[in-house]
Amino acid sequence: MDFKQHIKEVADYPKEGISFKDITSLMQNGEVYKKSVDELVAYARERGAELIAGPEARGFVVGCPAAYALELGFVPVRKEGKLPRETVRVSYGLEYGTDILTMHKDSIQPGQQVVILDDLLATGGTIEATIKMIEQLGGVVAGIGFLIELDGLGGRERLEGYDVFSLIRYED
């Protein structure tokens, strides 16, 4: 299936010069949304996932249904202050400063095979922070899957050494 035809591009959003790739148009079509998640499920199964992790918020949109389909647990990766129990945290750089991601300290067992799922790979900063937390807890990143990858922003290169899968790739 050509998933790209179901992504709407929004010019100059969130700021001038950016062509935003809107996944909500894909999600509005139940058949297409299901097939896109099915592709990520197949990838996670192939990678031997024992657990799915996803950064907020759109990582939840693909990660939760994939975890459900695989009958696996889901680990939410959240911004600081959003999780109620003891967490691990990683600070990561943004183009305009830094942010902090967290996950529950007891969410991953040593040696557990974790597949990270998210909507978009751009620079890779969020995923790199997620990887650090998984590995800090002793988990193994078995693979990383995305709906969309924006080539030319360095994300894939930043994740060198990890298996990366994308349903849709845009060359910029």
Image: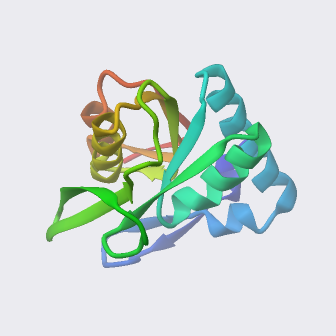
Task: Return the residue nearer the eye: 21 or 132.
Answer: 132
Task: Return the residue nearer the eye: 55 or 35.
Answer: 55
Write down the quadrant of residue 138 in the picture: top left
Write down the quadrant of residue 92 in the picture: bottom left
| Residue at 60 percent of width and 29 percent of height | 49
Residue 51, position as x, y percentages in the image: 58, 38
Task: Return the residue nearer the eye: 154 or 113.
Answer: 113
| Residue at 26 percent of width and 40 percent of height | 154
Residue 89, position as x, y percentages in the image: 26, 57
Residue 147 shows in the view: no
Q: Is residue 29 above or below residue 37?
A: below
**For the view shown, which residue lies furthest in the left direction?**
97
Color scheme of the displayed model: rainbow
Numbered disc total: 0
Residue 137, position as x, y percentages in the image: 34, 38
Q: Is residue 103 above or below residue 156?
A: below
Q: Is residue 15 left or right of residue 76?
A: left
| Residue at 39 percent of width and 76 percent of height | 12
Q: Is residue 167 left or right of residue 98?
A: right
| Residue at 58 percent of width and 60 percent of height | 60
Q: Quadrant of the N terminus?
A: top right
Q: Is residue 94 left or right of residue 4?
A: left
Residue 155 shows in the view: yes
Residue 93, position as x, y percentages in the image: 16, 58
Q: Is residue 102 above or below residue 75?
A: below
